[in-house]
Amino acid sequence: MNGERLLLLRIRCLWEGFSIVFASKTATVGLAIVLFWVFVAVFAPALTPYTPTEQDWRACNKGPSRAHILGTDELGRDLWSRLMYGARIVLVVLPVSDHFWIPGGTALWGVFASLILGATLGLISGYHGGWIDETVMRLLDAMMSIPIILLYLIIVASIGASAVNVVIAIAIVGTPGIARLVRSLTLDIRTREYIRAAETRGESPWYIMFVEILPNARGPIIIDAMLRVGYAIFAMGTLGFLGLGLPPPSPDWGSMVAKGREFILAGSPWAALWPSIAIASLVVGLNLLADGLREESMRYL
């Protein structure tokens, strides 16, 4: 019986979460955009007869046609297949090497790593206070004083361009902002009565931080994480455009824009147009979803 009640409770919580999304038109539109890209990323092999590196030398820099619905790039590669497989790298799989992939997109892993680092630092700083708080915050402030794009360039140029190194860069750049958010939430939650009760029971600081404080701060953190996934996707596009993203011939959206812009004045804008729209639509979708959830969650406060 207890197992059945627990299952029903989880289903109810899941349904309440979805109801919050569908209660907001903004969040619903954002979710639809994000789910579209997740769908094409997951089912990419079934949605196109081409691989992202397959070349058709008879159709270089061609516009949309029956054979290539979005056209081709300068090497005759199908743009639709490259967009879909590029979405896979962003949202579905992380290429660790040429023959080894792990579930979870590059942007998602980067944000997840920054959440772990930032939440840990923010909890420690906000709960303990004193010299620990001052030391951690001043170090993070020093990182935040560096322009974000410049910090990305410094990190990736130092450790090399690869999917794993892009994850590392996203994690490092995103950590200060998450740490400051978690710290501010911790400063408020640590004054609550149930925290005092846990301290009276003799619970360890780590238990209080990760079992008592962090779950009660998850709402703002989840919404902030959605926004950061959009920022990470935009950062991946920027790094790819500058030649510091995924190495060729990976279907990196940013590098596709960089290559395609060379042929815009020649009358072939497709190779730059479609990946630009892909980046913009996915980032906008994530932002709409996060904004809608934030608006709806404020109504319950």
Image (tube, rainbow, N blue to C red):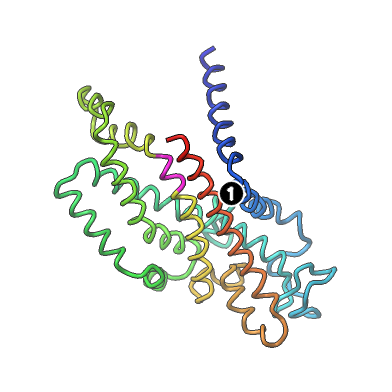
Residue drawn at the location 29% of the way across and 32% of the way down: 207
Determine the residue located farthest toward the bottom in the rendered image: 266
Q: Is residue 132 left or right of residue 251?
A: left
In the image, farthest residue toward the front: 299
Relative side of 289 to 53, left or right: left
Q: Is mark 1 on a helix, strand or loop?
A: helix
Residue 220, image x, y percentages: 41, 44
Residue 37 colored in magenta in the image: no
297 w.r.t. 103: above or below: above
- Please tell me which residue is depicted at 71% across the width and 52% down the height of the picture: 43
* Magenta-tinted stretch: 218-223
Residue at 43% over, 40% down: 219
Which residue is depicted at the point 57% across and 27% down? 11
Residue type highlighted by circle 1: Thr
Q: Residue lying farthest left?
A: 131
Left or right: residue 218 compared with residue 207 = right
- Residue position marked by numbered label 1 in the rendering: 26
* Residue 220 forms part of the magenta stretch: yes
Crowding at mark 1 (Cα within 10 Å: few <14, some 14-19, many 20+)? some
